Amino acid sequence: MNDIVDRPGTIDAILLNDCWGEDWIRSEGVIGALEFYGRIIDFFEGHKILQDKSVGYKSLMFSNTKHHSWGLHHWFKDRYNIIEVSEPEQLRGYLRHRDNLLVTGASWKVCLHESQFSFSELQKVDMTVWSHPNLVNVTGFKEPIPPRVTDIDFKKDGWEKMENKWPYFGLWRLPNA
């Protein structure tokens, strides 16, 4: 078990779900992936969710290392310490019951709803799941201007928006099952 610093009222970890590298972007002809990754990084930095690589209480977790050779995009690897996990149960080695896990990635319909690392699968390993429209994207990235996930999508799925609760301003929480 890693050393965990008790930081109540914070995001304990972040899961980057399907934020693939340059080979994927080129081979799949993906449009808008870099803009999306930039939004994620801007959100992290603007909301002070992450500290720099020298701070040990925050970790990014990447979910897809076993499943594909594309790897995580270097923008994330260059900025943050990444712990690679291949199944949700591995999160238990780093996080405690009901720790706050901020989930980011693509795609809203497939990877975040139907995959091994879907929102509901993450709840099954006792995480409190958080996200935000700027941190998720839609399937494919193949349209000239991909549509964006909005607050309406989160509301339809039954998420709760934390409007005025520090430090979660504007984040959405998936109610625990």
Image (cartoon, helix red, strand yellow):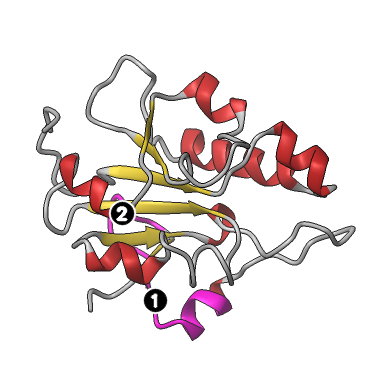
- Disc 2 or disc 1, which is closer to the eye? 2
Circle 2 residue: 88
Residue 72, x across and y down, in percent: 56, 34
For the record, the magenta segment spans 152-169
Q: In the current view of this chain or complex, which residue is farthest to the right?
A: 144
Residue at 54% from the left image edge and 62% from the top image edge:
111
- Which residue is located at x 75 percent, y 67 percent? 147
> Which image quadrant is residue 27 in?
top right
Which of the image's four quarters has the N terminus?
top left
Q: What's under tag 1, amino acid-wise?
A: Trp
User: Tag 1, which secondary structure?
Assistant: loop
Q: In the rendered image, which quarter contains the C terminus?
A: bottom left
Q: Amino acid at mark 2?
A: Pro
Cα–Cα gap, marks 2 and 1: 21 Å
- Residue 156 vertical placement versus 104 (above, below): below
Q: Along the polypeptide, which appears first: circle 2 or circle 1? A: 2
Q: Is residue 162 visible?
A: no
Give the label on residue 159, or none.
1
Lateral position of residue 94 relative to residue 107, left or right: left
Q: Residue at the far top: name it.
A: 54
